[in-house]
Amino acid sequence: MGTKIKAILFDMDGVLIDAKDWHYEALNKALGLFGMEISRYDHLHSFDGLPTKEKLRMLSEEFYLPESLHSFINQMKQQYTMEIVNTKCRPLFEHEYALSKLKNQGYKMAVCSNSVRKTIETMMEKAELLEYFDFLVSNEDVKNAKPDPEIYTTAINKLNLLPEECLVLEDNKNGILAAKRSGANLLKVQDVHDVNYTNIMNRIKEVENG
């Protein structure tokens, strides 16, 4: 028999919220103020899942974006993201159902995202999921964002659990790498609709029967 799963850690973008394009659109809108943009190919293959500060650092290295503009672009990107969130972020019944059942079964749950705390809180409130989580871990709570495992090890330590007692839901390469490096169990999802009670419980049974 495998170890008993006691906690479930969720990435946010692409897992709980279908927001990948929102970040892409918001950053490009901010970059567009200075005549720059990220291609969809680069977004999917190089930038997906990284915090905005890291994306801007990469743009400075590759495309000579002046570092003096980072703070302003980051600020505008967050503003544009909030505008999109307030327009598009809506509850998904399958998520509310899954998290409600999991909480009633006694599982601890947390969101571990490379986004800033304000974005996580707003999206979780809009999706009507905030009440189900014991806590949130943002990129402001760690020194190293994903793919570094720190965001997950921080959550696991806060829960006072072993990595193997936790299940992580992730969708992109940076998050998957962070989850694996943390030593936790992984459920890889393709999109937000893979995040449902049946899939989560099936993975938990796989781990516990392993």
Image: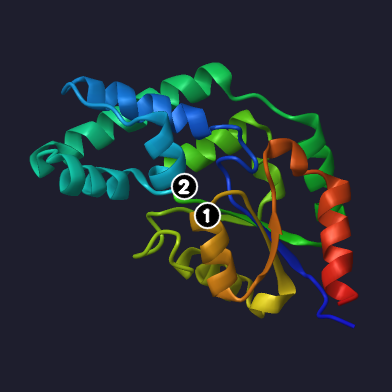
Residue drawn at x 61%, y 49% as measured from the top left: 171
Judged left or right of residue 154, residue 29 is left
- Helix, strand or loop at label 1? It is helix
Q: Residues within 10 Å of mark 1 (few under 14, many from 20)?
A: some
Q: Quadrant of residue 83?
A: top left
Residue 19 placement: quadrant = top right
Q: Is residue 99 above or below residue 91?
A: below
Q: Which mark is residue 173?
A: 1
How many residues crowd around disc 2 within 10 Å: few (fewer than 14), some, or many (20 or more)? many
- The type of residue carrying mark 1 is Lys
Q: Position of residue 150 (x, y in %)?
A: 46, 69
| Dot 1 or dot 2, earlier in sequence | 2
Q: Nearer the viewer, residue 204 or 191?
A: 191
Furthest-top residue in this view? 87
Q: Residue at x 60, y 34 (%)?
A: 125
Q: Are marks 1 and 2 in contact (CB under 8 Å)?
A: yes
Whether residue 158 is visible, yes or no, is no
Disc number placed over residue 49 in the picture, else none:
2
- Residue 89 visible? The answer is yes
Q: Work out whether 133 lies above or below 160.
A: above
Q: Position of residue 82 (x, y in %)?
A: 43, 26
Image location (x, y in percent) of residue 116:
41, 45
Q: Is residue 98 left or right of residue 74?
A: right
What percent of the width, then of the height, locates residue 203? 82, 61
Q: Considering the image in quadrants, where does the C terminus appear?
A: bottom right
**Which residue is rendered at x = 26% and y = 36% of the image?**
74
Residue 150 vs residue 60: left or right?
right
Give the amino acid at mark 2. Answer: Gly
Q: Nearer the viewer, mark 1 or mark 2?
A: 1
How is this picture coloured? rainbow
